[in-house]
Image: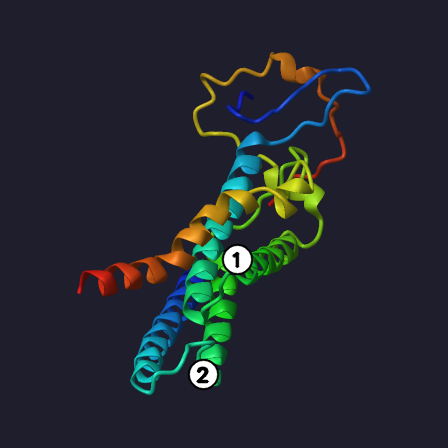
Amino acid sequence: MRIGFMVGILGGILLAHAGYATIQYRGMLKIVEEEFSRPPMNVVVELLLGLAFCIWAALAAPAKFRSIHPDSEENRIVSLPANLDFMIFNHRGKVFPCNAEYKLKK
Amino acid sequence: MAREGDRGASGGAEDDPPIFNAENLQSNIKSIHYSRTFLSIIGGVIAGIWGFTGLTGFIFYFLVMAAASFGLAAKAKFSICTYFDSWNRIFLDGIFGGLMSFVLFWTYPLVRKKFVVNCC
């Protein structure tokens, strides 16, 4: 996640630099009285690179996906709390099918 | 043992709706929402700097969203059913919500420039 943030910040810096370069370019075009159609090629490359970094950061920085199936391996409850005085086991959950072949997860 | 937010639906019959861990599903949906919002803003900034006008800008937005959808599907290791209840979550949700953010950041420098030029 930290790497995602750093890559996102790098992408933002690239975009800011590209924006500044475009403003300078537009100012130069005003002096020579030409119309702005698109930024110079190096700015376009910088924009695409910044976009790539930001896409990578947008996918890497938020939390990882977690499985939604209650019987998946990562959702298994592997230990009981230390204080069992308030634990109830005689509830409606007994209608769920039970897999008797589960081994203890270490 | 009781666990809050654990079950989406339950029952003993054969044709019951599937049971999901609602907490994890919500976390996954939030993660997609953050990604799409961030990319909508970045897409708007790039479209503004590049100087896109009219339909070209919207086409650029949908291209960025398509890339985001592909990236999200890859993040889910292309097994959408493990992490979401429907394919629409990855491919459709959040696209039109992000469109407004995109337009805001796309047109912001143009509006500001026009305002500053007219004032001075």
Q: Residue furthest left?
A: B120
Q: Residues within 10 Å of mark 2 (few under 14, many from 20)?
A: few
Q: Nearer the viewer, residue B58 or A97?
A: B58
> Circle 1: is it few (<14), some (14-19), or many (20+) Cα within 10 Å?
many
Q: Which residue is mark 1?
A: A59
Which comes sooner in the sequence, label 2 or label 1?
2
Question: In front here: A63 or B89?
Answer: B89
- Report whether B108 appears left or right of B9: left
**Is residue B112 shown left or right of residue B81?**
left
Q: What's the residue at 42%, 58% (across, down)? A: B106
| Residue B60 coordinates in the image, percent (x, y) | 56, 62
- Nearest to viewer (mark 2 / mark 1): 2
Query: Where in the figure is residue A102, as x and y percent of width and height?
Result: 72, 36
Same chain? Circles 2 and 1: yes
How far apart in space, not on screen, are marks 2 and 1 (Cα)? Answer: 29 Å
Residue B61 as seen in the image, left or right of residue A73: left
Q: Which residue bears the numbered disc 2?
A: A40
Q: Are marks 2 and 1 in contact (CB under 8 Å)?
A: no
- Residue at far bottom of view: A32
From the viewer's perspective, is residue A65 above or below residue A39?
above
- Look at the image and tell me whether residue A105 can be seen: no
Q: Amino acid at mark 1?
A: Leu
Quadrant containing the C terminus of chain A in the rendered view:
top right
Can you tell which quarter of the image residue B20 is in? top right
Q: Amino acid at mark 2?
A: Pro
Question: Which of the chains bears the disc numbered 1?
Answer: A
The quarter of the rendered structure image containing the N terminus of chain A is: bottom left
Which is more toward the observer, A23 or A85?
A23
Q: Residue drawn at (71%, 49%), measured in percent from left and top?
A: B79
Q: Is residue B105 visible?
A: yes
Q: Position of residue A87 (x, y in %)?
A: 50, 18
